[in-house]
Image: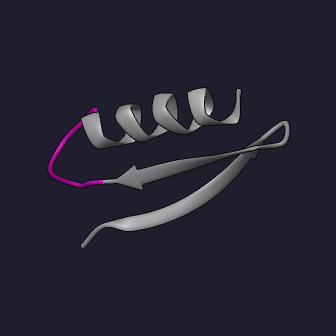
């Protein structure tokens, strides 16, 4: 069961996807980078 939450860094919404299956969730990293670039 994944929990999706939005965190606001400055004015940029950053999507964090928490997965119990991975210590470092690549989807979280991908989403963070993607939305950060989209904000710029």
Classify the position of the C terminus by image quarter: top right
Main SS category, magenta section: loop
Q: Is residue 31 left or right of residue 20?
A: right
Report whether residue 30 is seen. Answer: yes
Q: Quadrant of residue 30?
A: top left
Q: Is residue 6 left or right of residue 31?
A: right
Residue at position x 67%, y 51% from top?
A: 7
On the image, the x and y values in percent for residue 23 come to: 24, 36
Q: Is residue 38 above or below residue 1?
A: above
On the image, the x and y values in percent for residue 5 come to: 54, 62
View extreme (right): residue:
10
Q: Is residue 37 above or below residue 31?
A: above
Q: Nearer the viewer, residue 29 or 18?
A: 29
Residue at position x 58%, y 27% from top?
A: 37
Q: Is residue 8 left or right of residue 5?
A: right
Q: Is residue 17 above or below residue 1?
A: above
Q: Is residue 10 left or right of residue 17?
A: right
**Number of callouts:** 0
Magenta-drawn segment: 19-24
View extreme (bottom): residue:
1
Q: Nearer the viewer, residue 27 or 35?
A: 35
View extreme (left): residue:
21
Residue at position x 84%, y 36% from top?
A: 10
Report whether residue 25 is seen. Answer: no
On the image, the x and y values in percent for residue 21 come to: 15, 51
Residue at position x 38%, y 41% from top?
A: 28
Verify whether residue 34 appears in magenta: no
Q: Quadrant of residue 2?
A: bottom left
Q: Quadrant of residue 1?
A: bottom left
On the image, the x and y values in percent for residue 35 come to: 56, 39
């Amino acid at each position: 069961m994944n929990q999706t939450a939005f965190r606001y860094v400055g004015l940029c919404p950053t999507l964090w996807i928490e997965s119990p299956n991975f210590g470092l969730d690549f989807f979280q990293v991908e989403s963070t980078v993607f939305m950060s670039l989209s904000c710029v």
